[in-house]
Amino acid sequence: MSELIQNDAYKREELKKIIQRLHDGEPVSRVKKDFDTLIQNVSAEEIAAMEQALMQAGMPAEEIQRLCEVHVTVFENTLESQGKPEKLSGHPIHTYMAENDAARSSLKELKRAYWRLLFPWGRTKTASEAFTRAIGDFKKILIHYTRKENQLFPYLEQAGFDAPSKVMWGKHDEIRALFRDIDTAMQNQDYGTAALKARLLAGKAQKMFFMEEHILFPTALRKLDEKTWVTIRRGEDAIGYAWIRPGSLWDPDIIESRLMNQALDAKAAATAPKAAPATPAAASGVAPAAEPAATVLPPSQVPGAVKLGEGWMTTEQIDLMLQNLPIDVSFVDEYDQVLYYSDNPERIFPRSPGVIGRNVANCHPPKSVHIVQRIIQAFRNKEKKVAEFWLELGGKFVHIRYFPVYDKQGTYRGTLEVSQDVTGIRALQGQRRLLDWD
């Protein structure tokens, strides 16, 4: 066993050296040969485990991302023989795989479209319109990535397996940046640049297919149990799907029922309420007396009411109030865990149940984690009272603010995030003092 441990340690050390060579600008073609020699007959899980070990040793996710291109090139033959995970329709992995199949079809159309724009003679109005449709359709892949980030990565983190997901999130952001570059080029009618960026996008997307299907998904199937997959499936609708809808052969309700203990079923049956005997009035055919009018209780006496700073409300009322605010609200506690987000129907940024209990640092792309940590640390130290940002997103002007939360003793208890679409507010002029409903 000690020999195996030492061998793994040797591989990790050599892997560090290879990453440094990539960092120093050495061509992938030269690194590939040494990388191939270093690692033989490696499994999908071992690939990800090596990344995990390097992350735990303090290597930044951005550096490990340099290996992604080499990973795909070197391990194609090794991993191809392992096959793809097979699951019934409805299982999250099956849905991801089905989306990848649809994405490949969409990518074929995009390739046909951008090839015409690569050449000046092909840059006709018809060609540019076809490209706009194709890139718009392929952009649906971002929903696929967002669902991974919110509904798969958190559970891999809980299983102690966060390095591969952080690396992959960084690759997602590279693809997102290319979509933005293409949008800008098309707005400027720079069709040649748009086509070149689309060709680069296609290459990165194809590599992502490979990394998902041969590394991420097989590892997730081994790491996560069925109960976790049920939880993942139930939170997926909050993010949505790309091109397809999940099937129903793998039903989370059926799976959960199968996982339940028979003793619990027996207990539930034993405690099931029995039908109430017929009342004399019902037996005689006489209509029962009308129910007395509901009594309006003082707020403090309402069952389930919670004492707030000022006033009393039930948890249901609190939840309804927060869901109907014209802002997005999230709360992170003093241990940096996400405790809450307001699930209103017009959320600006996607959220799903998988984020609850997740460390807030893992809810952001690796390149922006240091900003999150800086904000929270400043709030802990009472150095700042607010951090705010604003940006244009999908035709909306979005204002994002972070506020520290302290208790009466001045102890830091968490951070409140408030996001708001202020497009309409920025456009206000003059005054309105009267109701204009009529």
Image (tube, rainbow, N blue to C red):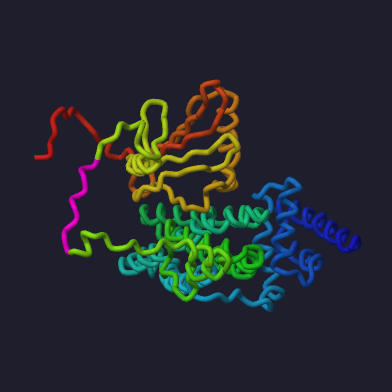
Q: Residue furthest left?
A: 438
Q: Quadrant of residue 8?
A: bottom right
Whether residue 16 is visible? yes
Q: Position of residue 145 (x, y in %)?
A: 51, 59
Q: Looking at the figure, which quarter contains the C terminus?
A: top left
Q: Is residue 320 left or right of residue 39?
A: left
Q: Which residues are magenta?
A: 285-294
Q: Looking at the figure, which quarter contains the N terminus?
A: bottom right
- Residue drawn 21% across and 48% down? 291
Q: Position of residue 72 (x, y in %)?
A: 65, 67
- Residue drawn 47% across and 53% down? 352
Q: Quadrant of residue 423?
A: top left
The kind of secondary structure the magenta stretch mainly shows is loop
Q: Residue furthest top?
A: 409
Q: Is residue 34 left or right of residue 320?
A: right
Q: Nearer the viewer, residue 281 or 153?
A: 281
Classify 217 as above or below 315: below
Q: Nearer the viewer, residue 368 or 73?
A: 368
- Residue drawn 58% across and 39% down? 336
Whether residue 192 is visible? no
Q: Nearer the viewer, residue 290 or 331?
A: 290
Q: Does residue 404 show up magenta in the picture?
A: no
